[in-house]
Amino acid sequence: MEEKEFKMEDMVNFCKTYGYIFQGSDIYGGLANTWDYGPLGSRLKNNLKDAWRKRFIQERPNAYELDADILMHPRVWEASGHVDSFADPLTDCRHCKTRYRADNLVNDFTNSSMGDKMTNEELLDYIKTNNIPCPKCGKCDFTDIRQFKLMFETYRGVTKDNKSVVYLRPENAQGEYVNFLNVQRSMRAKIPFSIGQIGKAFRNEITPGNFIFRTIEFEQMEYQTFCKKGDDLKFYEYFKDYGKKFFMDLGLPEEKLRFHDHEKLAFYAAAACDIEYKFPFGWGEINGTHDRTDYDLTRHEEYSGVPQKYLDPETNEKYIPYIVESTYGVGRTVLALLCEAYHKETLENGEEREVLKLSPYLAPIKVAVLPLIKKNHSEKAMEIYNMLSKYFMTSYDESGTIGKRYRRADACGTPYCITIDDDTLNNNTVTIRNRDTMEQETLKVDEVIKFVEDRIKF
């Protein structure tokens, strides 16, 4: 069996064809860096989020889920530092008018991250001194660098004279921080404990997106662990390994995952590391784990005037907890899973098939029910479909040859196909086909539910 390599454009076309992901506002020509998840994509995304909830909330002691509002008091973003410093250094090519992040121009030219450490003046001077060309037109003639705000602003209020600025949140973490006391008191939580949240965030990105890797609207699976100073680095190392195992259990191979320690730490951070996956376009971040010390709660205490100290019930010691953050990008993880699962195979008979070898737990549709002959077997097939759909996502397909229906199910990532034929009518048995091996076996109808359930666990 021979496999063919694919490019990111192939993945974009594949996702559109099979109902995973569509261009946002497609009939109007699309809106850059926006994407809509189709019937299968939305199921895959929800299955991923359920896997995260199971692993990070359900299976971990002293872990609590939160669903904070997208709009928060503007002082939150002053305390977090986003109002003053959350911006990109942008420059335009004077010839072709293409806009770039100046730090990215330097980083790409040097194949390093040195641009991250430069001031605007240093960036512009380095670009001119080294004659860094515009990636599009090849000229080196750039405008002065301007700071481009990454937070979306909107206004609250009904009259022109009574409006106040509010922001679409650029991250979820602040929702966990400002609710630290609420969760601790209501759940009677003792440190160490964790708050997790899945939610949308928004960033006014101008850089190319690489499909759903970088978008202006995205979802994060955030996890904040509140602990005592001195225990923070232990939790930091723990969650690095915990996150890597999570990705591997989802189906990403270890050889395509790596840790990337930050060369430049935020002034308040004790440690920071990304988990990267090797996409077709190169290594890309899918997780970030950070030891944020006591910076966040200290800032919110300062700006809100509300004490954020924790009273240890055993020692009577009061202190502001340290925070270890572990953040997972929903869209980026979905893209990694799709890239890893997608295969274009040439079979021994010369036939070609597209197959999406997703983990059965993550697969949007678990079982496809296929009547062998529509006229003879569709009634019984629909009866079995109605039975199975009460337990897991099931599809029904009676159009075309059985071979073509197998191929459609393979491309959609459906791990099992059940064929209803004369033996079903006479003996109450079905043929169940495995997506990855294409092998078939015969089961009694009343054995099918347990057969599938045993194989879709996470």
Image (tube, grey):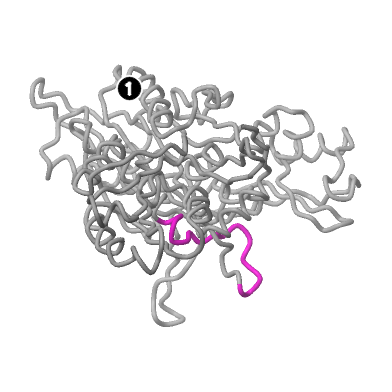
The answer to which image quadrant residue 349 occupies is: top right
Report the span colored magenta.
27-42
Q: Is residue 122 left or right of residue 447?
A: right
Mark 1 nearby-residue class (10 Å; few <14, some 14–19, many ≥20):
many
Q: Residue 296, percent across and down? A: 36, 38
The answer to which image quadrant residue 316 occupies is: top left
Q: Which residue in the rendered view is the most extreme toward the left? A: 314
Of residue 32 and residue 350, the one placed in the foreground of this image is: 350
Question: Mark 1 sits on what residue?
Answer: 235
Q: Residue 171, percent across and down? A: 43, 48
Identity of the residue drawn at 75% across and 35% down:
108
Of residue 415 and residue 269, the one placed in the foreground of this image is: 415
Q: Is 188 above or below relative to 9?
A: above
Q: Quadrant of the C terminus?
A: top left
Q: Is residue 214 left or right of residue 316?
A: right
Identity of the residue drawn at 58% across and 46% down:
354
Of residue 326 and residue 242, the one placed in the foreground of this image is: 242
Q: Is 448 above or below relative to 240?
A: below
Q: Which residue in the rendered view is the most extreme toward the bottom? A: 159
Q: Is residue 39 magenta?
A: yes
Count of labels in the image: 1
Q: Residue 307, percent across and down? A: 22, 40
Type of amino acid at the residue the image marks with label 1: Phe
Q: Residue 32, percent across and down? A: 63, 61
Q: What element does badge 1 sit on? A: helix
Residue 28 in sight here: yes
Q: Is 157 above or below relative to 421?
A: below
Residue 76 in sight here: no
Identity of the residue drawn at 41% across and 24% down:
240
Q: Quadrant of the N terminus?
A: top right
Q: Is residue 434 magenta?
A: no
